[in-house]
Amino acid sequence: MRKALIWIAFGAALIALPHGLSFSQQEILVFLTINILVVSSYRLLTLTGEWSLAHVVIMGVGAYASAMMTKNLGVYVPVAMLMGGIIAALIAVVLSFPLFRMKGFYFLIGSFAAGEIIRLLWKHFRDPFGGAKGIKGIDPMPDFSIGIYDFDFFEPVSYFYFAGFIVIVCLWILWRIERSPVGLTFHAVHWQDKLAEASGVNLRAYRTLAFAVASGFAGIGGALLAHYIGTINPGSFDLDYMVFVLTWAIVGGTGTFYGPILGCVVLTILNEVVLRELGFEQLRPLIYGAILIASILFLPNGLESIVQKFTKRSAKS
């Protein structure tokens, strides 16, 4: 009963939150919501012990696919978003054939190369990708009404509610996957790969599955972004964005489901509230780098370890 009340209060707070913010802060809230999905999907891949530098580019695959389907084929936006996620997952499966011949550092570098090849294709082919200028005039989410509330998707509040609903559903699915036998096998592939293989587990198949599922949800995140901002280009999914995702995951910690989410929220608040207000926003890469190094040296288990210590002390008292 107590947990239910906590979740109800949390949900009510999320619903009320954007109404106490300015227009620009509401937009930041939308981007934060999308980034939470991206970093949470990235964590699913890390469960198998692999870290990719192509995750943001594959997010872009979902964005491009959804944008092209709505703009060129007239597909209904929510359907196109789902298809964008499916196409991103299929691209990940194709990439898995060369990439999963490698492990560890070599996989990391291989994924970076694969991502850059995809970005070069976007830049080189003006038709259908729009070349270096990308795709403009992407169809927005069509307005609709539920009861007395009218969803006007040119308003950040409406898009926050829509994106928030999609992200919560995706997070619930990711959470269920992690707690399922498949999720336990992902952990085994990471920590006991030799034992898992001896038990008949196909390591490559499970790594491919994690890669595809993580990419699918990242693709949905990319589609949500594309239909909100209305324009995308190869620079929208560059290495800087990937470094931010890595930083959110590492600073937050990947040992728990909420770790990367915590890292994303804390660093977004730091950037948008502190750095922007103080006029230091251009120093964000430098400050993020310093935070990343400090986290690795002094907080190797991430911010989640602080939460765990606090909850343990509360439980004892």
Image (spheres, rainbow, N blue to C red):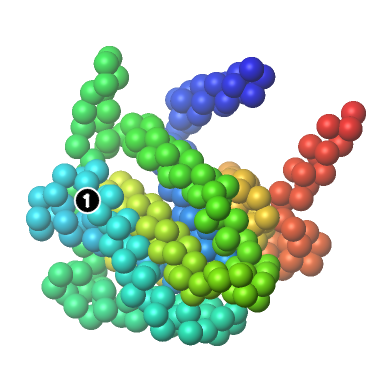
Along the horizontal axis of the image, is 236 left or right of 49? left
Comparing 38 with 96, the one in front is: 96
Q: Which residue is mark 1?
A: 80
Q: Give the x, y percent position of residue 45.
A: 52, 63
Q: Residue furthest left?
A: 73
Q: With respect to residue 61, does 39 lie above or below? A: above
Q: Name the residue type under label 1.
A: Ala
Q: Give the x, y percent position of residue 18.
A: 46, 30
Q: Residue furthest top?
A: 148
Q: Residue at x 42, y 39 (%)?
A: 169
The crowding category of the residue bearing disc 1, from other C-alpha atoms within 10 Å (few below 14, some 14 to 19, many at least 20), is: many
Q: With respect to residue 231, does 289 lie above or below? A: below
Does residue 64 appear anywhere in the picture?
yes
Along the horizontal axis of the image, is 45 left or right of 213? right
Quadrant assignment for the N terminus: top right
Q: Under tag 1, what secondary structure? A: helix
Quadrant assignment for the C terminus: top right
Q: Residue at x 60, y 56 (%)?
A: 184
Q: Residue at x 58, y 60 (%)?
A: 185
Q: Give the x, y percent position of residue 13.
A: 54, 24
Does residue 287 appear anywhere in the picture?
no
Q: Residue at x 89, y 32 (%)?
A: 316
